[in-house]
């Protein structure tokens, strides 16, 4: 079973004496020599007592600094055994952690299964005799979410930094910050950046159903709140309109989250929105998540995150065009089901090694994750820009292909606003069932095809009146 991450902020300060006490209790090979020297004391229950004086930290440091195995053991315990527990109170936490599914103990792939509604049939005793053994296969859909993020964050701790740590108890806190805070904060920041980019790309690709709202002003806050509430209530009813795969499902109000830009939130009167939802203000705020901006991105850092070990940038990663910026600027909020997100932690580990020549330790924080969305869960994008398909163009528009050959066609969908850009491919004019076009636009001409020309057509899913085509001449 996955472990669900905690989203509650931890603000308690690090207690360096408590940290050192925990290190000693977790590392008997360190504690024993210090107990023998009387620097620390053992309680009757076996726990360690440490006097929080400056002399005590100096004495602990004198032993650790002058015995290399003790230095290695101390830092290893500090990072791997203590840091994972304590540093969470100091690190930057992903503001969208509520959407994470948890930590996977084993495996790299998550299989998501959805069973669609069964078809209704008219009762008929006469047909029952004929159909008694007929099978009715349920409409079962499956989506696979595969680990697609494997990064590591390096940090170096010098021998001199370790010495500084034992000058005072505050030095222990500073050492923890130097080792752990920066890499943990970096990983959390990158998680948020990837999730934000992923959601924005879903909006631009038309993978989220659009709902038209007027551009926000203080005067029309009630009108916008009414649209939000109407959509939220509609999502509670069974529908196939609000998910990518077109399955029939619903989302209870308690599982709906409203992601709003800070610009929208600073203008919108959320007391009005709470009244429209007919719920308490505090309850509504518990399901409102902020996003700083869908337009402003750290593009260089995102490119680094989407670059593999060979230096190749993932083809799905593309900075916004001017048209896409205009579309995203017109999106004040998105409503998603909590199940829309498929973000999992797969693996975390801190590794270390000591460089004797350079007198420093290298630490590497490894983070593996799965970033994906569910094709079965519901999501709605509120937009002030009207969505429409303006044209569908297939390239090339004409081609010649011999029998038995394949050809990949391209398609370009021009649009305004948030709208589904998917197309459905079809082929006409063929005489053989072996001549076909795939969902990706790959055409195959059968060896027994007798037709002289076939027409391959791409029709907009959002607007079937818009289409493009390629006329293929079949070579004998």
Image: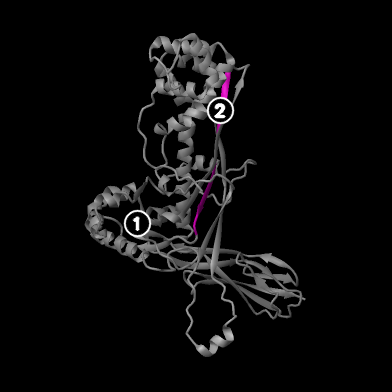
Give the image location of residue 277, x and y in percent. Answer: 27, 59
Left or right of 226 in this view: 208? right
Left or right of 428 in this view: 237? left
In depth, the one of 9 and 174 nearer the eye is 9
Q: Please tell me which residue is depicted at 43% across the width and 49% down the height of the picture.
A: 99
Left or right of 171 in this view: 356? right
In the displayed structure, 47 sits above or below 348; it is above
Residue 281 in sight here: yes
Q: In the image, which residues are magenta? A: 359-374
In the displayed structure, 363 sits above or below 34; it is below
Q: Quadrant of residue 41?
A: top left
In depth, the one of 458 and 44 nearer the eye is 44
Give the image location of residue 54, x and y in percent. Answer: 39, 11
* Magenta-drawn stretch contains 75: no
* Magenta-drawn stretch contains 364: yes
In depth, the one of 435 and 465 nearer the eye is 435
User: Could you say whether the residue bearing mark 1 is in a helix, strand or loop?
Assistant: helix
Q: Quadrant of residue 141?
A: bottom right
In the displayed structure, 166 sits above or below 399; it is above
Q: Please tell me which residue is depicted at 48% across the width and 67% down the height of the picture.
A: 247
Main secondary structure along the magenta-highlighted residues: strand
Residue 366 in sight here: no
Q: Please tell me which residue is depicted at 37% across the width and 45% down the height of the picture.
A: 292
> Which numbered marker is on residue 254?
1
User: Could you say whether the residue bearing mark 2 is in a helix, strand or loop?
Assistant: strand
Give the image location of residue 466, x and y in percent. Answer: 50, 72
The earlier-in-sequence mark between 1 and 2 is 1
Q: Which residue is mark 2?
A: 363
Which image quarter holds the C terminus? bottom right
Q: Please tell me which residue is depicted at 34% across the width and 63% down the height of the picture.
A: 231
Q: Quadrant of residue 185?
A: top left
Give the image location of residue 83, x and y in percent. Answer: 47, 29
């Amino acid at each position: 079973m996955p472990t669900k991450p905690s989203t509650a902020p931890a603000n308690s300060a690090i207690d360096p004496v408590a940290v050192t006490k925990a290190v000693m209790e977790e590392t008997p090979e360190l504690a024993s020599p210090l107990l023998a020297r009387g620097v620390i004391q053992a309680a009757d229950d076996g726990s360690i007592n440490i006097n929080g004086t400056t002399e005590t930290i100096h004495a602990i440091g004198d032993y650790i600094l002058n015995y290399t195995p003790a230095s290695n053991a101390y830092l290893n315990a500090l990072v791997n055994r203590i840091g994972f527990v304590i540093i969470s109170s100091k690190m930057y936490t992903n503001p969208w952690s509520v959407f994470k599914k948890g930590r996977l103990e084993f495996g790299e792939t998550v299989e998501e299964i959805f069973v669609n509604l069964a078809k209704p049939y008219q009762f008929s005793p006469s047909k029952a005799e004929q159909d008694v053994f007929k099978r009715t296969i349920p409409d079962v859909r499956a989506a696979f979410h595969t680990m697609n993020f494997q990064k590591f964050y390096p940090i170096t701790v010098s021998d001199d930094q370790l010495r500084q740590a034992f000058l005072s108890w505050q030095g222990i806190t500073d050492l923890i910050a130097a080792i752990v805070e920066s890499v943990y904060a970096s990983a959390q920041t990158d998680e948020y950046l990837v999730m934000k980019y992923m959601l924005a790309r879903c909006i631009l690709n038309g993978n989220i159903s659009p709902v038209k709202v007027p551009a926000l002003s203080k005067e029309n806050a009630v009108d916008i709140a009414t649209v939000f509430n109407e959509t939220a209530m509609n999502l509670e009813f069974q529908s196939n309109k609000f998910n990518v795969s077109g399955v029939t499902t619903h989302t209870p109000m308690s599982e709906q989250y409203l992601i709003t830009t800070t610009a929208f939130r600073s203008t919108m009167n959320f007391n009005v929105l709470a009244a429209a939802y007919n719920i308490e203000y505090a309850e509504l705020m518990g399901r409102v998540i902020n996003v700083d901006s869908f337009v402003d991105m750290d593009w260089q850092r995102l490119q680094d995150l989407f670059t593999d070990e060979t230096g190749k940038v993932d083809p799905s990663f593309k900075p916004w065009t001017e048209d896409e910026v205009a579309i995203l600027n017109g999106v004040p909020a998105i409503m998603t089901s909590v199940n829309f997100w498929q973000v999992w932690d797969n693996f975390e580990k801190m590794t270390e090694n000591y460089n004797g020549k350079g007198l420093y330790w290298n630490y590497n924080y490894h983070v593996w994750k799965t970033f994906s969305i569910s094709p079965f869960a519901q999501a709605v994008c509120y937009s002030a820009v009207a969505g429409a398909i303006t044209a569908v163009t297939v390239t090339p528009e004409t081609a010649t292909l011999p029998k038995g050959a394949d050809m990949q066609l391209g398609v370009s969908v021009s649009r305004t606003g948030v709208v589904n850009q998917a197309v459905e491919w079809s082929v006409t004019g063929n005489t053989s069932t072996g001549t076909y076009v795939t969902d990706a636009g790959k055409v195959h001409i059968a060896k027994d095809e007798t037709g002289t020309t076939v027409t391959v057509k791409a029709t907009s899913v959002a607007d079937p009146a818009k289409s493009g085509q390629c006329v293929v001449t079949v070579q004998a």
